[in-house]
Amino acid sequence: MLPVVTALTCFLCGKTYDHSLVQGLCECGRPLRVDHDIHPGTMSLAEVALRPPDMWRYREVMPDCEPITLGEGMTPLHEASVLGADWWIKDEGVNPTASFKARGMSAAVSMARKFGSRKVAVPSAGNAGGALAAYAAKAGIEAHVFMPRDTPRACIVECECHGAFVNLVDGLITDCANEIARRKDQEGWFDVSTLKEPYRIEGKKTMGYELFEQLGGLPDALVYPTGGGTGLIGMWKAFDEMERLGWIGRERPQMVSVQAEGCCPIPTAYTNGERFARMHENAQTVASGLRVPKAVGDFIMLDLIRVSGGTALTVSDNEMVACAREMAAQTGVFACPEGGATLAAAKTLLASHYFRETDKVVLFNTGSGVKYLEALSL
Ligand SMILES: Cc1ncc(COP(=O)(O)O)c(C=O)c1O
Ligand SMILES: [Zn+2]
């Protein structure tokens, strides 16, 4: 069956937009959600199981386009025993371009090509830029990547090798985004910033479908290193779709967001009982993917964390690096600092009895340690 997209709907105000046209943010300034016509029978697990092991196997709920693919998705889910608890690690580091960003960019670039875009631009903490550069290379589209000057070197070299135009900015990812916003109309760039176009979420949501397929059900909780939030928001959307498909009922995993002590707008807003997060001034962390001081989808994350009975917490840079190394040494998964942050957070939650040893908890290693040699070296 072909996917049937019905509309794009604002996550905040509910205004709908025509999905046959290129759309960015809602006029209220917030992200748009891709709505599919989904009902029991739209997609069966038995059929999906026979398809190639990549994220496009969920094609009935994917964007309606010819995929630009490098084989992203269907990453391994490893059992990992830590401190007596039986947890799982979803290893996104084995995706093309060595991070989960491949999923979002495969979907976004496929749609950008469908709409005839010739030039795409993204502000990036590193991994999104590398992924955009690779998928744009495959699609024959020009990529313009804006990254903070202190982005891990592997990501910069990766973008250059894929033929992207690399712009290093003295500032944070928010400064990179402002630079793109200022120049994009004049330069003819299509802006694929996190949540500023609707389709990256559609790629990221496949992590939720995969978890369900791989575990044969939902976990009790998942721990996710949060920057702009596409992963959390995407998986939450997948669970809603799975309910409409008749795969699950109203149950959901507890959604746990982890950020760095030096950049923690989401845990701060969560603790203060706020729906919108404030800008985190002077953001600093070695986990470049978590150095997002302000996210346009903040309220979506905060809503889903609360509705799921989840939580949001911080870990220090030292803890996340130590835990990334521990994950590598104990499980064979060469984790990035962001992945290490999930282990550090889960340990804290186990010690505080938020998690029980019997809880089925999934940690997301969102990228490969190979990209972070500076941060992971002793
Ligand atoms: C390795 C890694 N983990 C996590 C994140 C945060 O991802 P999200 O925007 O889905 O919250 C990023 C974003 O750059 C990243 O590169
Ligand atoms: Zn709106």
Image (cartoon, rainbow, N blue to C red):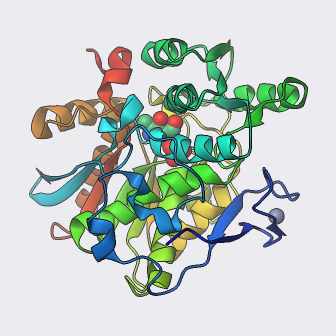
Q: Residue at x 59, y 63 (%)?
A: 302
> Picture coordinates of residue 9 (x, y %)?
74, 68
Give the camera-side residue of 268 and 81.
81
Give the camera-side residue of 233 and 43.
43
Give the camera-side residue of 315 and 213.
213
Question: Left or right: 291 with respect to 86?
Answer: right
Question: Left or right: 179 with respect to 378?
Answer: right
> Picture coordinates of residue 295 (x, y %)?
66, 47
Q: Is residue 28 above or below residue 38?
A: above
Question: Left or right: 14 with respect to 264?
Answer: right
Q: Residue at x 66, y 49 (%)?
A: 195
* Rendered-image quadrant of the C terminus: top left
Q: Is residue 35 above or below residue 132?
A: below
> Picture coordinates of residue 219 (x, y %)?
29, 69
Q: Quadrant of ligand 2?
A: bottom right
Q: Residue at x 50, y 26 (%)?
A: 130
Q: Residue at x 72, y 47 (%)?
A: 196
Q: Quadrant of residue 374?
A: top left
> Picture coordinates of residue 288 (x, y %)?
50, 29
In this rendering, does residue 163 appear at all? yes
Q: Quadrant of residue 150?
A: top right
